[in-house]
């Protein structure tokens, strides 16, 4: 019986595999036309300073408003976009849209003067020649100061790679901030911190999840915070969902936090509402 079930499972599995592959090929084709069809949108998740919970930045998070599939999450299409190369045009769109939006907020709300907009950039995008020029053009077309932009890359995207290291140096030269995203999850090489000119470490949310109990995740989170301080990097903890997690993360020395506790990824208009409220409230 077990053997038969195993066999059936196997047949079923390969059927599913076939369906999945066909589905992927179709998705890849659709990814190729989605930018021109205006199917992407950005949501913005607040990043707050943990000392006073003031919103100091937002992270732009892409959504695909697919005509028949509905809202597709980035985890379901960004890897495909990277493999197929479509990430280059999708990423360029995201960068232009986020910088344009940040410039609008700055024009409208005094509280947005120093608001940082974080944009995720894939390794493949970072290594594309002309990427840095594209970023510079996006900033100048939008009229956004470089200091209002932060670019997020993952460790794997920049691991042992001269092209991306050079691109990052040039981005820093423009005055753009650079964050290492999901820090601690990949095959992290601490040597990376010596060669890559980052300004910010973003502790992955997997460490925050169990931060309220003593254990290895908390020990790693502590070490990352101490390392950030010693290296004079900013530190952000992702995925804060409860007050207990916020308190622990703050007590470990993290400067900034991001997570559902402070806000879900929001449409631009709702970020505007928050900025409007902040603009009427003097800084404590
Ligand atoms: P990420 O850059 O690490 O973004 C954080 C993810 O964690 C977001 O998922 C966010 O919605 C989610 N998150 C934030 N706070 C919490 C929390 O308190 N609890 C939980 N459970 N989750 C939280 P999202 O929006 O689905 O994005 C997933 C990933 O897709 C991002 O991870 C990023 O790697 C990628 N991505 C998103 N937008 C872009 C983009 O424009 N370009 C590229 N290359 N990648 C993108
Ligand atoms: Mg990110
Ligand atoms: Mg992250
Ligand atoms: Mg992540």
Image (cartoon, rainbow, N blue to C red):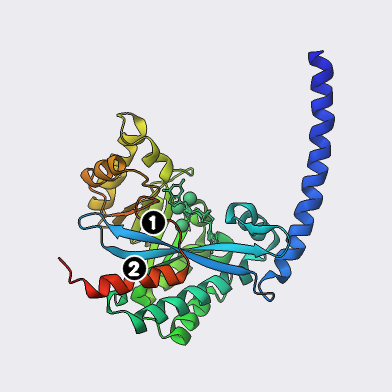
Q: Which residue is mark 2?
A: 274
Please tell me whether mark 2 sits on a helix, a strand or a loop: helix
Badge 1: how crowded within 10 Å, few (<14), some, or many (20+)? some
Of the image marks 2 and 1, the number of the one nearer the N terminus: 1
Q: Residue at x 21, y 58 (%)?
A: 52
Return the x and y of residue 54 as percentages of the image width and height.
26, 62
- Gap between marks 2 and 1, in whole Å? 11 Å
Return the x and y of residue 111 as percentages of the image width and height.
28, 74
Return the x and y of residue 202 as percentages of the image width and height.
38, 53
Return the x and y of residue 268 as percentages of the image width and height.
45, 70
| Camera-nearest residue between 60 and 156 | 60
Query: In the rendered image, which quarter is residue 277 located in?
Result: bottom left
| Camera-nearest residue between 167 and 235 | 235
Q: Is residue 15 left or right of residue 84?
A: right
| Camera-nearest residue between 149 and 54 | 54
Q: Respond yes or no on whether mark 1 lies under 8 Å from ligand 1.
A: no
Query: In the rendered image, which quarter is residue 212 located in?
Result: top left
In the depicted structure, whether residue 60 falls above or below residue 279? above
Q: Residue at x 39, y 51 (%)?
A: 259
Q: Respond yes or no on whether mark 2 lies under 8 Å from ligand 1.
A: no
Query: In the rendered image, which quarter is residue 216 located in?
Result: top left
Q: Which residue is mark 1?
A: 263
Please tell me whether mark 1 sits on a helix, a strand or a loop: loop
Picture quarter with the C terminus: bottom left
**CB-based contact (under 8 Å), mark 2 and mark 1:** yes
Picture quarter with the N terminus: top right
Numbered label tally: 2
Query: Is residue 127 visible to the viewer in this orientation of the structure?
Result: no
Q: Residue at x 53, y 65 (%)?
A: 163
């Amino acid at each position: 019986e077990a053997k038969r079930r195993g066999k059936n499972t196997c047949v079923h599995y390969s059927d599913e595999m076939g369906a999945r592959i066909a589905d992927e090929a179709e998705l890849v084709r659709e990814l190729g036309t989605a930018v021109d069809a205006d199917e992407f949108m950005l949501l913005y998740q607040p990043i707050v300073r943990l000392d006073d919970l003031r919103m100091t930045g937002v992270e732009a998070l892409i959504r695909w408003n697919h005509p028949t599939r509905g809202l597709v999450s980035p985890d379901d299409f960004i890897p495909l976009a990277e493999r197929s190369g479509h990430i280059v045009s999708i990423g360029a769109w995201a960068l232009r849209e986020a910088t344009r939006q940040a410039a609008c907020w700055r024009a409208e709300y005094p509280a947005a003067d120093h608001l940082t907009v974080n944009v995720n950039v894939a390794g493949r995008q970072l290594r594309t020649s002309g990427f840095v020029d594209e970023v510079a053009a996006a900033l100048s077309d939008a009229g956004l100061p470089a200091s209002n932009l932060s670019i997020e890359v993952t460790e794997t995207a920049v691991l042992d790679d001269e092209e991306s290291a050079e691109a990052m140096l040039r981005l820093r030269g423009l005055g753009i901030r650079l964050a290492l995203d999901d820090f601690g999850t990949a095959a992290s090489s601490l040597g990376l911190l010596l060669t890559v000119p980052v300004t910010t470490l973003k502790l992955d949310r997997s460490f925050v999840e169990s931060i309220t109990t003593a254990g290895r995740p908390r020990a790693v989170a502590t070490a990352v915070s101490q390392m950030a301080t010693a290296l004079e990097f900013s530190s952000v903890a992702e995925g804060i969902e409860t007050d207990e997690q916020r308190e622990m993360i703050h007590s470990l020395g993290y400067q900034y936090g991001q997570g559902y506790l402070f806000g879900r990824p929001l449409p631009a208009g709702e970020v505007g509402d928050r900025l409007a409220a902040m603009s009427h409230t003097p800084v404590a």
